[in-house]
Every structure is written in C-alpha cells, then in structure tokens.
Image: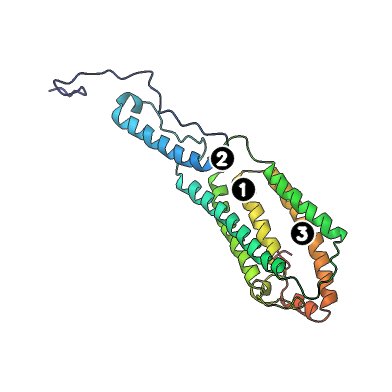
Amino acid sequence: MGLSNGPPDGQPHHPPNRNSEPPANCDSSPSFFAAWDSALDSEKCFKSQRHEARWNPRFSIGTRIENTTPGRHPIQTLKLATYSAYLTSWLIVTIAAVAGALPRFLKPSEDPKPTTISAPTIIGTILQILAAFTITNSLPKGNLQPTNSELLATLFLSPLSAALFVWALRSVPKNADPDQLITTGAYRWLRHPIYLAFLLLLLASGLLISAGTNLILSTALYLFGSELRIALEESELTARFPTAYPQYCKQTRWRYLPGLR
C-alpha cells in the first residue's frame, strides 16, 4: 500500500507555485523612529514565513526561514524592551530636569549674586555638546541594526542613567541653603554624579545606533569637557568651603567615575 501526499479524494489538486516567494512587507522603513515598528513587522514576517512553510511543502523543502535582520537574533522582544527602556529613560531625565529647574525660576533668590561664566565652563560645555552631536551624526540612513550585545548594554545603561540622575536631584533637600554643601544621598558616593548619569546615557545612545568609532570620539569629547568643568567647580567649592570641601573630598574619593576618577 503506497503512501500519497496528494489531496483527499474529491478535492482539486493545485500544484505548488515554484515561483512563490516568502511573504512581502518585510522591508523596513528608512526612519529612526521606524525601528520600533520594524521590530513588530519583523516578528509578523517571521510568523508569516513559518505559516507558509507549514502549508506549502515546496516552500519548506530547501527553503530557510531567516530573520529579516541578517546576522541578528530573531527574537524581537529584546528590541522592544530596549527601545522602550531607552525612550522612557530620556523622558524621565527630561521631566526630572525641568521639575528641578522650575523652582529656581519661579522663586528667585532674595540675595542674587552676579553670575560669571568662565572660559573652562564655556569650552567644557561646547565639548559636551559636540559629543552629543557626534552621536546624533552617526544615525544610520535606514533602520537601526544593533547587535544583541549592544541591545543588552543599552537596556542596562539607560535605566541606570535615569535612576542616577533622579537620585542625584532628590539628594538635594528642597529647602537647602544655597551655601550648604550636599554630602548625602548620591553625593555620598560620587562628588559629581550627574556627570556620570549623562555619560551613561551618551553611551547607551551610541550603542543603540551602533556608532562604533564615533562613540569612542564622543566619549573622549565628553570626558574632556567634563574634566574642564569639574576642575573649575571644585576650585570654586574649595574657595567657598575651605575646610568642609577638602574633608568631603577625602571621604568621597571619586569625582564621577567610580574606581577611575
């Protein structure tokens, strides 16, 4: 008794289309914000290919179901989690920065002091802006194609940066005296934690867009600019707190890079 792969009796037999192709709509939209939709589309495309392989024997013979992103893991959950964490971290940092700055604008100081901006502050700020611009200029023309390791690093760094930024802001009491030296909370462990928070967010951005060598350049620019600004800030703090600040530096060893600086 022979085995037959044909259709049951009474049903027409349609030969498989040898020119059949995997399902369409697997191409990505060349946009930065299309990366989110691309992750969903890739998952739909993969499921469609799997469905085609199940019901079309010709498709399943000698045909390899591949992820629409060559060289990447087919699981799209990691991408969605990373994009969500990254965008949420930026949103939290923005809201926290605005909320922290509003009281100073709504309630001006009773004894305003003239504000002078020195050359190290200007140069350091420009270098930090150039660091961010270097990352932005590295955006690919098409969809983002981060590797799994880059996604995992971004998924770890971006929430960490947001948490550190919020912690540093909340470490300052609401009714703190402008002449009070803050040494508690995040400032118990780092003398300038906000610089580290922005560095982590910069690294997360560079990894997410696979900036490569531009990420190294951007990090160098940011570190150099931060060193200029921190050196000036610490000299001013030493002048304002000639006894307390040197003692604080002895207790809190690291400026903003734990174990390094």
> CA–CA distance between discs 1 and 2?
10 Å
> CA–CA distance between discs 3 and 2?
30 Å
Q: Identify residue for label 3.
A: 226
Left of 170 or right of it: where is 20? Answer: left
Please rate how many residues cluster around mark 3, counting C-alpha atoms within 10 Å: few if below 14, some from 14 to 19, many from 20: many
The quadrant holding residue 260 is bottom right
Three-letter residue code for mark 3: Ser
Label 3 close to label 2 by CB (< 8 Å): no
Where residue 117 appears, as percent x and y from the top left, is: 85, 61
The quadrant holding residue 199 is bottom right
First in residue order: circle 1 vs circle 2? 2
First in residue order: circle 3 vs circle 1? 1
Q: Identify residue for label 1.
A: 207
Please rate how many residues cluster around mark 2, counting C-alpha atoms within 10 Å: few if below 14, some from 14 to 19, many from 20: some
Whether 102 is drawn above or below 223: the answer is below
Q: Identify residue for label 2.
A: 145
Three-letter residue code for mark 2: Gln
First in residue order: circle 3 vs circle 2? 2
Q: Residue at x 63, y 64 (%)?
A: 99
* SS at badge 2: loop
